[in-house]
Image: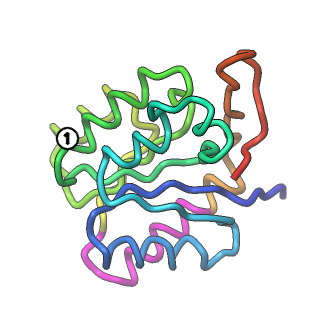
Amino acid sequence: MRTRTLQVMLIEDNDDHAELVAAALEVNNLVGNVIRFADAESGLDYLIGETRAKRKTENPLPDLILLDLMLPGMSGMEMLKILKQQPRTKSIPVIVLTTSSLDSKIDKAYELGANSYIAKPIGHQDFVIKLAELNMFWSVTAELPRPVDEESNTSKESLF
């Protein structure tokens, strides 16, 4: 069984949820780094901000993005739409991790290009189990795309 260490970007405004996500992802020792942003704007600035040279050297692409929908300012849905329209970020798997299990939100997230939608369980233990399963799937089972270098339009290894 082949495993890889994931570099994860977490977009989550709730500090308690963010700590729980980071701790649960590290349980299986398959996550190398979790970088967290409390709002969509700062996450987008990191990924596709104005300074192209800075992005390439200081802000390498994550292997996976965990995205809450209920964020201050720009919503997670708006961020998802932008991510999937940008050449630099469109192939990064985005997993919506949110409290809503409304069919309309699930349908909209997939329509905008989400790779998975997970409703956060209420119980702590159930939440930890779901995140461990997510971690195992993306670390062991799934084949991840390699980030694309914008200038040469070729794949590059993750730099995280």
Tally the numbered discs.
Answer: 1
Say above or below: 20 vs 72: below
Give the extent of the magenta segment: 121-135
At which x and y percent is residue 65?
49, 48
Say above or below: 157 vs 5: above
x 40%, y 36%: residue: 114
At which x and y percent is residue 20?
41, 78
SS of the residue under disc 1: helix
At which x and y percent is residue 93?
53, 39
Q: Nearer the viewer, residue 52 or 137?
A: 52
Residue 78: name its quadrant.
top left
x 37%, y 51%: residue: 67
Say above or below: 76 vs 52: below
x 76%, y 20%: residue: 154
Asked if residue 157 lies left or right of residue 47, the reply is: right
Q: Residue furthest right?
A: 1
At which x and y percent is residue 38?
32, 60
Asked if residue 120 lies left or right of residue 158, the reply is: left
Q: Nearer the viewer, residue 15 or 5?
A: 15
x 28%, y 57%: residue: 98
Name the magenta segment's main secondary structure: helix
- Residue 21 in magenta stretch: no
Asked if residue 151 lies left or right of residue 112, the reply is: right
- Residue 128 in magenta stretch: yes
Residue 44: name its quadrant.
top left
Q: Nearer the viewer, residue 115 or 87?
A: 87
Give the class, few, some or many, for how many residues have Cα within 10 Å of label 1's Cα (few <14, many ≥20): some
Kind of residue at badge 1? Lys
Q: Quadrant of the N terminus?
A: bottom right
Residue 107: name its quadrant.
top left
According to the image, label 1 marks what residue? 105
Colour setup of the view:
rainbow
